[in-house]
Amino acid sequence: MSGKQSVIASDTTARIRAAADMALSVTGVGKHYDSGFTLDDVTFDLPKGYIMGLVGPNGAGKSTLIRLILNTVRRDRGEIRILGRDNIADEEWAKERLGVVFDSSYLIEYWRVSKVGRAMADMYDAWNQRAFDGYLVRFGLDPRKRVRELSRGMRMKLMLAVALSHDARLLILDEPTAGLDVLARDGLMDILRDYVADGERSVLFSTHITDDLERAADLITYITGGRLYYTGPKDEFEDSFRIVKGGPDDFDGAVASASVGVHRYGTGFDALVRAEDVARFMGGAGERAGVDGSGRSGLVVEPASIDDIIRLTNTHAAGDGFGPAGDAAASGVDAAGVTDIASGAAVSGMDAVGVTAVANGKETGR
Amino acid sequence: MSSMTDNAIGTAGTAGVATRGETDTGRHDAVHTVRKAFLMDWHKLTSQGWAWIPLLVIGMPALAVGIAWVGWDGSLSGIYGSISYVYIFVMTYPFMYEQQGHGEAMNGVIPVDRAHQVVARYLMMFVSVVLMVSSYLLTWAGMTAIGLTGAADAIPNALGFMWGYLILESVLCPLLYRFPIQKAFVWVMVVALAVLFTAVATFISASAVIPSDVVDGVLGAIGSFGNTLTARPMLLAAFGVVTAAIALAVSYRLSLRIYQDKEL
């Protein structure tokens, strides 16, 4: 492990380490497509009793990762274990214990809601018809309606009802909140929190809506450009970064070299900086700056949100808003000082997996 | 990697792994999961209700007998051929529903692996044959009841259509796993035409370079083989069973290979 890949220790991490039973363990998984996209060497663990948010920009590889876990796409390399068993060798055993919700319905469109229940009762040994009927009532699903007559949100609820009605130990949800109103999203997050409350069940869900993460996720796995960027506790993800804001003239070499990502615009810039690197350009006030936002004249340091981190770790040096590479070069700043995460080249000296957490005792990152 | 990390993984590897022989809610023998896949195919087949299946089995013979009652002057073989043709589409129904929307993704969610799904799909083919034979028998019974002569003579032809059905489905099934339904049927026609064209072209080419007495000898041998089969029903039946079994075995292997590589 390189010195740059720091191990973040905290109570949360220690708690996760202690949870030896993994609901999901993904190790060195890779998949290459002829289109050129590659999911590269992804490793993370989801312990039992936790909710993990899978985040990343469009095309990052979230859905591919979920499909690899479900073995609907064959992996090129690596290992995936669901509740301790290989997801291919013990596929039927694993899927008996998996609940799945996709962003679009996988159910036959001509089926009535009641037929969905009958069909799934024949699929799962642990099917609980009473629970299914209860969820239909709770979600306001009319058993006589056909799947194709349901709205997107209601189809998601129907898939969720199926997922929750056969004693699944691991829920995998791919963009479940897309298309849901705020009340439905809140309701879903409440269901997920209740679901993991016994400490034996877990949830992996991908989302673009970071409010959902804030509300429900204990852990975050962030992938971008097909590569793992971070996996670990959600709070530590946000605490690991700061947003440094300044005017156009404040963007100098020190800021550029310390930045993980920068967005430059006409009146200034936003730079994403690892928390421990803030001191590098804030001078003696660095530590204090990381806390209260004061420090080097002209620069403001603020906490980073998940959205900020995703946004700024996907900025490109050559196409960075109002601050193209040419501007940086003209001002004496090496354009390469801005990390180009999407291409996998971390040229500021920081590894692309700039923040590496240890979740459940397994080293994460590359 | 730290020893602590190793220990954590080691613990997960032992505590988290259940043994294969455990007795829990999951019964994972092949018969059990094939049954699940078969039931799923049946649910797909009856996506818009189950009533159309008995209607199909009974309705087609009833229609044929009704037409005969008012004055049919065609052959019963033609009726059996029509029934076989309709049942070809029965097998396409599970594929059709999977190809609508994201229906195929369900096959990646249910606790049945792909090999068992393919086995179940071929079992569905045999069920389709049973339904087809039921229609044949009802047609024969109805025709006999109204006194149509030659009803019993049509039975061998019905068996021939059944053989043809299995051969055609053997070709069609792997194509349905590989292509959308419309394209699969186009490919069936392309394959049939290619075989026909190749056979005719080969015959014409061979006739041009091979002495006519040799060609006549080969044709005579083929004709003789056909006559032998026709004259000995048991031999004909054995030939039919063996060729259908080979076709189905090859078809199953192809379907499995295609489906295993497919992204759902």
Image: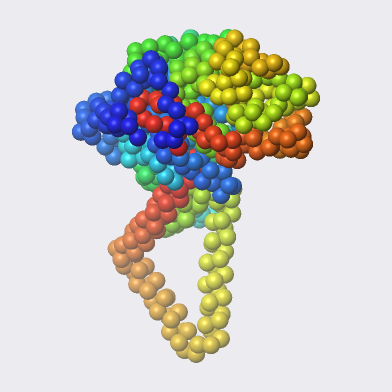
Percent position of residue B1, x then y: 35, 35
Q: Is residue B143 above or below residue B110?
A: below
Q: Quadrant of residue A71?
A: top left
Residue in the image at 21% along x and 27% along y: B23
Percent position of residue A206, x then y: 52, 25
Residue in the image at 64% along x and 28% along y: A254
> Is B225 on the left or on the right of B91, as rendered?
left
Q: Residue furthest toward the right?
A: A266
Count of numbered tags: 0
Residue in the image at 62% along x and 12% along y: A293
Residue placed most toward the observer, A320 or B252? A320
Quadrant holding the C terminus of chain A: top left
Percent position of residue B31, x then y: 28, 38
Quadrant holding the N terminus of chain A: top left
Percent position of residue B169, x then y: 46, 52
- State the colouring used for the structure image: rainbow
Residue placed most toward the observer, A28 or A164? A28
Residue placed most toward the observer, A195 or B165? A195
Residue in the image at 47% along x and 89% along y: B213
Does the image show residue A124? no
Does the image show residue A64? yes
Q: Is residue A103 above or below residue B122?
A: above
Q: Is residue A70 above or below residue B205?
A: above
> Is A71 on the left or on the right of A243, as rendered?
left
Residue placed most toward the observer, B177 or B191? B177
